[in-house]
Image: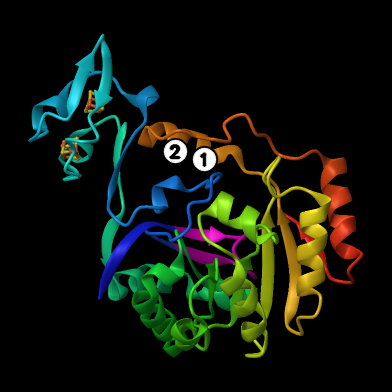
Amino acid sequence: MTTLVTDIQRFSLSDGDGIRTTVFLKGCNMRCTWCHNPETISRTPELMFYRSKCIGCGKCFEVCPVGAHKLIDGEHIIDRELCKRCGKCAEACYAEALATCGKEMSVDEVMAEVRQDKAYYDNSNGGVTISGGEVLCNLEFATELAQRCKAEGISCAIETNLSFPFETIEPLIRELDQVMFDIKLFDGEAHKKHTGIPNKTLLENAYKLDKLGIPLTVRTPLIPGVTDTEENISAIAEYISGMKNLVRYELLNFNPLGESKYRGLDKENLHESARPLAEDRLAGLKACAEAKGITVKIV
Ligand code: SF4
Ligand code: SF4
């Protein structure tokens, strides 16, 4: 079995306990307006163009079979309508200004990479985290990968939006040692407006998941003007405060690093001017959540 993998990040310290290898799978069912990994949303490979690295050698113009590289008013652009995502220009680009995002990989190939750091996992209580995109859009692949990790004594976790019917995801969940999931907005209308889908399923799944006895981390990305209100954080904290297996609630400060990816994909970034929250605002939101009697961490 194969799927599109956008990245395999080794020695990650922010995707679960201990030292981890995070496997990013391509494809997502949500359309969060602030996504900081926009290259993982589509289920097809994509071409990234980092203009600042381009040395103007013209190689990509020569190798493109459909003439998608164009000079318009002296500016090098990619005609995304014409591009067939064959990757030939990225292979030819010596300056690494072009990159194909999304590599078809088998479970065996992913295992060969993640296995290399087993000693680090063992010594740090770490393991593998399957992320995305949305893991559950690649359910079969993720389940087989989690089973293979378990068989080799490697702890496995997922980062998910949890918005799929519980009966379809339960077999995967049962292979895992921890689950990290997002509750971005508690208000259903606001959730639909900013992510493209309702939050009813994920909120119900949170408590179904809790019954399985797996350690859970709930996370909210703090998006200025969208999710970073005391009302939203208090409501989420209140909702999850009854979960028996909640390890902690994480508030993820806004990450502006997606900016260069939006430019590389020629996509509009709706939160271009947003910046991380200041310390005092973070402390205020943390206190709001802690008032519900749960452990809260700013990340
Ligand atoms: S091959 Fe790379 S460096 Fe050369 S013109 Fe194309 S994008 Fe620029
Ligand atoms: S990926 Fe292929 S079709 Fe697209 S611009 Fe590059 S060479 Fe042309």
- Is residue 264 toward the left or the right of residue 15 in the image? left
Q: Residue at x 74, y 77 (%)?
A: 246
Quadrant location, ligand no. 1: top left
- Is residue 28 toward the left or the right of residue 78 in the image? right
State whether residue 183 appears in this view. Answer: yes
How far across and down, in percent of the image, does residue 103 sit?
Answer: 28, 56
Mark number, residue 258: 1
Q: What residue type is disc 1 on? A: Gly
Q: Nearer the viewer, residue 153 or 257?
A: 257
How far across and down, in percent of the image, does residue 30 sit?
Answer: 48, 57
Q: Nearer the viewer, residue 24 or 232?
A: 232
Q: Residues within 10 Å of mark 1 (few under 14, many from 20)?
A: some
Over which residues does the magenta segment extend?
9-23
Q: Residue at x 70, y 39 (%)?
A: 276
Q: Nearer the viewer, residue 164 or 256?
A: 164
Locate residue 191: give its quadrant.
bottom right
**Circle 1: element type:** helix
Locate residue 219: give its quadrant.
bottom right
Question: Dot 2 corresponds to which residue?
Answer: 261
The answer to whether marks 1 and 2 mark residues whose Cβ atoms lie closer than 8 Å is yes
How far across and down, in percent of the image, does residue 175 sit?
Answer: 49, 87
Mark 1–mark 2 Cα distance, whole angstroms, equals 5 Å
In this picture, is 1 found above or below 273?
below
